[in-house]
Image (cartoon, coloured by chain):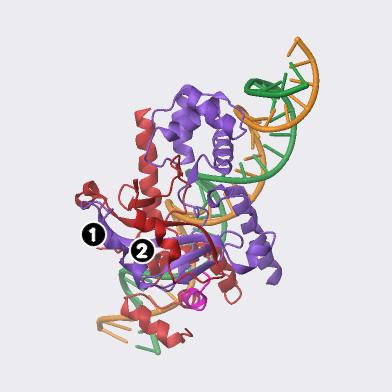
Chain colours: A red, B purple, C green, D orange
DNA sequence: TTGCTATGTAGGAATGATTCTTAACAAGGA
DNA sequence: TCCTTGTTAAGAATCATTCCTACATAGCAA
């Protein structure tokens, strides 16, 4: 996928985004690779051409592109590790509103390892299915961000929600 | 699952772990809930009974329990967000050695949303299947941690691998 | 072409989860 | 009871990410 500057320009215009050199460079770097770089990876790559760029800009731009649906975040849950004493095979329902994680157990989901799409040479050890959405409560509450697709959840929002949870916890104790 | 102190003791003994009050308290707190707490959540909960406990101990203990297979980490990839300009439905093969993420596209995996295990009242917006394992290269290299199940990868190891990648990147540029 | 305005960018500080280092402590075997 | 080794605590360090704010600029209108 070799995108020209004009391709990207019209892509951005179509989403109502301003076309800036930094923004184009970041998107171009991301679209030109299949290896799922981190924000920091992209920062280093773009900094070769734009030595003055700040990491801040990369985060802000990725967040904007994500909101516009031009970019997807591969791992939603990069903020904190979460633990589970249930080590039997099971999968998760994750509420994007309140961040609750519910277990689901299902044989069909456990058997996905035999999926033909997995290349022979990749040795699968474990797998996990995650469904993202909204629990009953959050479908009607302010946590529900109805206009935004799942991939547009801003880390900022996640962080804020997390802090709220924490302060709630502190109040309780 | 209401575990007694003795249940936990024998569980730990079976894995060759020393039985300490902090460790029991942390495991008990985790086993007593289904809500997938974070390390910080557990720290706050255990701190009610052990006000002198340090967050450090919680991290160390969770890491130990994870290595012993008594605890599972729900979100492997909590360290950094990774981005993808491919916003079409697809899934991932994740190498636990080199942390490479490969895309796989497969209709059957895209259709999982109709799985009967998902409660009606949960509104699914997106889903993602992640296969964890080792790519061809890492099956034979030192990245391969053959004795350890997927859930025993230490965050420490992940972090180290990440730093190695970063320094490699710095050397290149 | 010029000027205006909203949006984008950069710099620096702050936040917060996690890890590192080190020294004291304690579980469990001899 | 003593010793050894694994655990714990404290404090500092690291690092991704976000916040705040002032300055810069893309894009529109005149």
- Residue D16 lies, with reference to residue A115, above or below; the image says above
- Circle 1 chain: A
Image vertical order of residue C20 relative to residue A57, above or below? above
Q: Chain of mark 2?
A: A
Residue A17, numbered label = none
Q: Residue at x 37, y 48 (%)?
A: A160
Q: Is residue C26 above or below residue A38?
A: above
Decide which of A71, D14 is in the foreground and name it: A71
**In this figure, what is the number of numbered marks?**
2
Q: Element under label 2? A: helix
Residue B58 x, y percent position in the rendering: 54, 35
Specify few, some or many for label 2: CA neighbours under 10 Å numbering under 14, 14-19, or 20 or more. Answer: many
Q: Which of pointers 1 and 2 lies earlier in the amino acid sequence?
A: 1
Q: Which mark is residue A146?
A: 1
Q: Which residue is mark 2?
A: A151
Residue B138 point in image, percent of width and height:
64, 64
Residue B156 position in % (x across, y down): 62, 48
- For the residues tagged 1 and 2, is the chain the same? yes
Q: Which residues are magenta?
A: A25-37
Tag 1, which secondary structure? loop
The answer to if A33 sits in the magenta stretch is yes
Q: Residue at x 62, y 33 (%)?
A: B16
Q: Nearer the viewer, residue B110 or D10?
A: B110
Residue at (35, 61) in percent of width and height: B127
Residue B87: image x %, image y %? Answer: 38, 72
Give left or right: position of A75 versus B107. Answer: right
Instruction: Left or right? Give the position of C12 relative to A3.
Output: right
Q: CA distance from mark 1 to mark 2?
A: 12 Å
Examine the structure image and report whether residue A30 is included in the region drawn in magenta: yes
Residue B1 visible at all: yes
Q: Is residue A68 visible?
A: no
Figure quadrant of the N terminus of chain B: top left
């Amino acid at each position: 996928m070799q995108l020209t500057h004009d391709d990207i320009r019209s892509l951005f215009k179509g989403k109502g985004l301003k076309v800036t050199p930094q923004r184009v460079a970041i998107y171009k770097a991301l679209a030109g690779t299949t290896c799922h770089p981190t924000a920091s990876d992209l920062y280093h790559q773009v900094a070769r051409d734009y030595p003055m760029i700040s990491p801040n800009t990369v985060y802000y731009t990725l967040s904007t592109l994500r909101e516009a649906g031009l970019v997807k975040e591969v791992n939603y849950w990069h903020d904190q590790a979460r633990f589970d004493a249930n080590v039997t095979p099971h999968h998760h329902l994750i509420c994007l509103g309140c961040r609750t994680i519910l277990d689901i157990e299902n044989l069909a989901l456990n058997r996905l390892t035999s999926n033909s799409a997995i290349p022979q040479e990749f040795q699968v050890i474990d797998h996990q299915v995650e469904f993202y959405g909204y629990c009953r409560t959050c479908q009607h509450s302010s946590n529900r961000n109805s206009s935004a697709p799942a991939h547009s959840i801003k880390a900022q929002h996640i962080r804020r929600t997390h802090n709220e949870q924490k302060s709630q916890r502190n109040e309780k104790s």
